[in-house]
Each structure stands twice: as structure tokens, then as C-alpha cells.
Amino acid sequence: MTAERGWAAAASDQDLDRSLSYMADDATMLPPAGGSVVGKAAIRDFIATAFATPGFSVHWEPLEAVVADGGDFAYTQARSVYTVRAPDGTLQTLHAKGVAIWRKEPDGSWRCIIDIWNEAPPPADAPGP
């Protein structure tokens, strides 16, 4: 949960290098309605493009972390809120749910190796319009 929370804070701050520090070199992102983004260089480009988009923001809250018995893999579940540009140029808020798979690296740090998310209805405790 510490790594997930750190990554969420880095993304919320739109800190590209700090965000990437939570991703393994061989990571894959699986964004909604898009192709796979494979490897840290491609992920850097993907995130940099998002951060550079006027009005873009992302905030997520980790809900749960489960660590494998061997202690070297884990998954987290989170819910998130994105502000993005709609095709007509207006800002829209999207709610999402996601799962990240984490690997414990030889230095003891946790790095995300798979990140997947998709749209979801707003949670029941989300503020109304």
C-alpha cells in the first residue's frame, strides 16, 4: 500500500519521473479503449502526453493490497477519478476502477509490472454533481 499511495501521489502531482519510478522497466499498461503500452519508454511517452493535456488530472485511492505467500508479488485494487478532454473539447470527469500487479525487486522495492483500469460508475460515496 505504501508503494501504491506513493505512486498515486506522484501521478496526482503530475510528476513524471516520480510516477515512472514506481514502474518496472518491463511494465505494461492496459488503458481503457486503447492498445497495450509496453516498456518504460513507451509508458513515459503515454504518461507525458496525458500530463501535457490541458485540464488533465488523475487521483486514485488504493483500496486493498494482497501479497502472495512468497512475498515477491502482490496486487492492489484502486478507484480513480480522471479529468480529460472529451472529443468536443469539453472537460469531463471519468471514474475508474483498476488493478495493479506488483513485483518485489532484488533491492527490496516494489515496482508495478501490470497496470489495468477501466471506467466505472461513481462510487456511492462520491460527491454529487
Image (tube, rainbow, N blue to C red):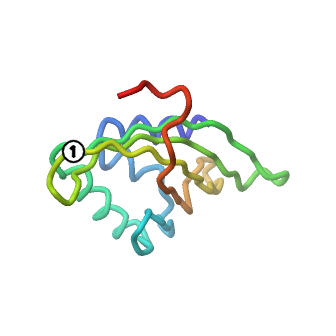
In the rendered image, residue 38, in percent from the top left (x then y), is placed at 44, 73
- Badge 1 marks a residue whose secondary structure is strand
Residue at (50, 69) in percent of width and height: 26
Task: List the residue tagged with mark 1.
Answer: 91
127 relative to 115 in the view: left or right: left
Residue at the right extreme? 69
Residue at the front extreme? 129
In the rendered image, residue 114, in percent from the top left (x then y), is placed at 56, 62
Question: Can you say which quadrant of the picture contains the N terminus?
Answer: top right
> Relative to residue 8, is residue 106 depicted above or below?
below
Q: Quadrant of residue 41?
A: bottom left
1 relative to 68 in the view: left or right: left
Residue at (41, 71) in percent of width and height: 37
In the rendered image, residue 13, in percent from the top left (x then y), is placed at 31, 35
Residue at (56, 30) in percent of width and height: 124
Residue at (51, 56) in percent of width and height: 117
In the rendered image, residue 123, in percent from the top left (x then y), is placed at 54, 35
Q: Residues within 10 Å of mark 1 (few under 14, many from 20)?
A: some
Q: Nearer the viewer, residue 7 or 124?
A: 124
Q: Nearer the viewer, residue 82 or 28?
A: 82
Amino acid under disc 1 = Leu
> Relative to residue 39, is residue 91 depicted above or below?
above
> Relative to residue 69, is residue 129 depicted above or below?
above
Total labels drawn: 1
Question: Can you say which quadrant of the picture contains the C terminus?
Answer: top left
> Relative to residue 20, is residue 83 depicted above or below?
above
